[in-house]
Image (spheres, rainbow, N blue to C red):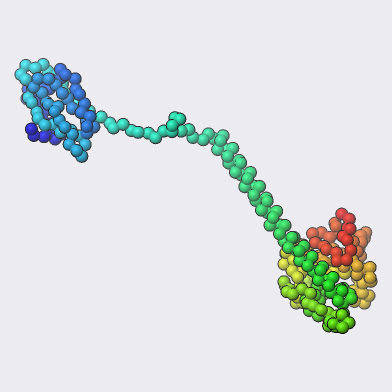
């Protein structure tokens, strides 16, 4: 039995209808499942449905065509319908998946913004605190070094630079008498002193270019000894004033604000109020810090 392509089957059927051959529709059409197409089946002499799918062809091939018997009643040929393949849709086991509502999205975004704000605030506070912590640690080391200097030499150093290099007028260490400069009391300077009178870094607290300890804001830490008459050379500070020596960092603004001499108006220069010191960090060397707000 010869196989006829599906397209040729349609053309032949149409031609036979025009020439007196008909397809008997007495028997309902049965679909050919293989290949995805449906074919028409009649009774008597008919277009045969004894067809088989050709692998890979995508539709059925008709093996034989039988002419319609004479006298058969007319019947229109049913159209050959292509049966669509079922479309499989992925669904969750519990039913179709639902999306997020606008309210849920707004709530999630609000939580994310809140968390981001908390992280930024925490990080900012840690960053702001780091220079202050580093400065306080440096000032604590300086106070210990000043104590060792005072024990060896018998008096306070004039500046922080005296802890790194032997100052003029101070004898070297005498192992027999066990007195004199036995430094350096700090092994490594972290910077140099730069004179800036407008910011409070005068020659009273160090010589320009002298070794210095730098605070967390890149300014030198000074050793400040208060003096009642404001003249540290002609009339050096007395013993009580020497007791109130303090290490001072200019703080974030880089300006020394704590008064080293009696300020104009009310206030004290030995233990000035905290409000007089601005953002300066202060560490007293020999007395407790009892400054009032």
Quadrant housing the N terminus: top left
Confirm whether residue 50 shows in the render.
yes
Left or right side of 152 for 28: left
| Residue 8 pos. (x, y %) | 12, 33
Query: Which residue is depicted at the point 18% across and 34% down?
Result: 53
> Residue 183, position in %: x, y?
79, 78
Residue at left 19%, top 22%?
29
147 displayed left or right of 55: right
The residue closer to the viewer here, 236 or 146, is 146
The residue lying at 60 percent from left, 43 percent from top is: 112
**On screen, residue 98 above or below 250:** above
The residue lying at 87 percent from left, 80 percent from top is 178
Q: Write down the quadrant of residue 40 in the picture.
A: top left
Q: State the residue in front, 50 or 216.
A: 50
Is residue 88 left or right of 148 when viewed as pictured? left
Q: Is residue 229 visible?
A: no
Q: Position of residue 124 (x, y in %)?
A: 68, 54
Percent position of residue 252, x then y = 75, 61
Toward the viewer: 45 or 74? 45
Quarter holding the C terminus?
bottom right
Q: Is residue 176 above or below residue 228?
A: below
Placement of 252 over or under 168, stated as above or below? above
Number of labels in the image equals: 0
């Amino acid at each position: 039995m010869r196989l006829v392509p599906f397209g040729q089957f349609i053309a032949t059927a149409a031609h036979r209808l025009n020439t007196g051959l008909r397809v008997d529709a007495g028997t309902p059409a049965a679909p050919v499942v293989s290949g995805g197409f449906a074919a028409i089946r009649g009774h008597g002499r008919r277009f045969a449905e004894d067809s088989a799918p050709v692998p890979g062809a995508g539709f059925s091939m008709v093996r034989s065509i039988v002419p319609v018997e004479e006298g058969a009643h007319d019947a229109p040929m049913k159209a050959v319908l292509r049966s669509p393949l079922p479309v499989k849709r992925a669904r969750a086991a519990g039913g179709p998946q639902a999306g997020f509502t606008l309210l849920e999205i707004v709530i999630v975004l609000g939580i994310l913004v809140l968390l981001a704000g908390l992280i930024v605030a925490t990080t900012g506070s840690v960053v702001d605190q780091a220079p202050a912590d580093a400065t306080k640690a440096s000032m604590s080391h300086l106070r210990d070094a000043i104590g060792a200097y005072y024990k060896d030499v018998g008096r306070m150093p004039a500046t922080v630079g005296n802890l790194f290099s032997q100052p003029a007028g101070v004898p070297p260490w005498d192992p027999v008498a066990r007195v004199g400069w036995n430094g350096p009391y700090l092994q490594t300077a972290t910077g140099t002193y730069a004179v800036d009178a407008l910011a409070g870094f005068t020659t009273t607290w160090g010589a320009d270019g002298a070794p210095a300890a730098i605070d967390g804001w890149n300014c030198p830490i000074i050793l400040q000894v208060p003096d009642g008459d404001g003249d540290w050379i002609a009339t050096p500070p007395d013993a009580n004033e020497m007791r109130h020596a303090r290490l001072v960092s200019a703080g974030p603004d880089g300006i020394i604000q704590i008064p080293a001499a009696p300020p104009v108006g009310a206030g004290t220069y030995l233990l000035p109020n905290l409000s007089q010191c601005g953002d300066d960090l202060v560490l007293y060397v020999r007395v407790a810090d009892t400054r009032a707000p």
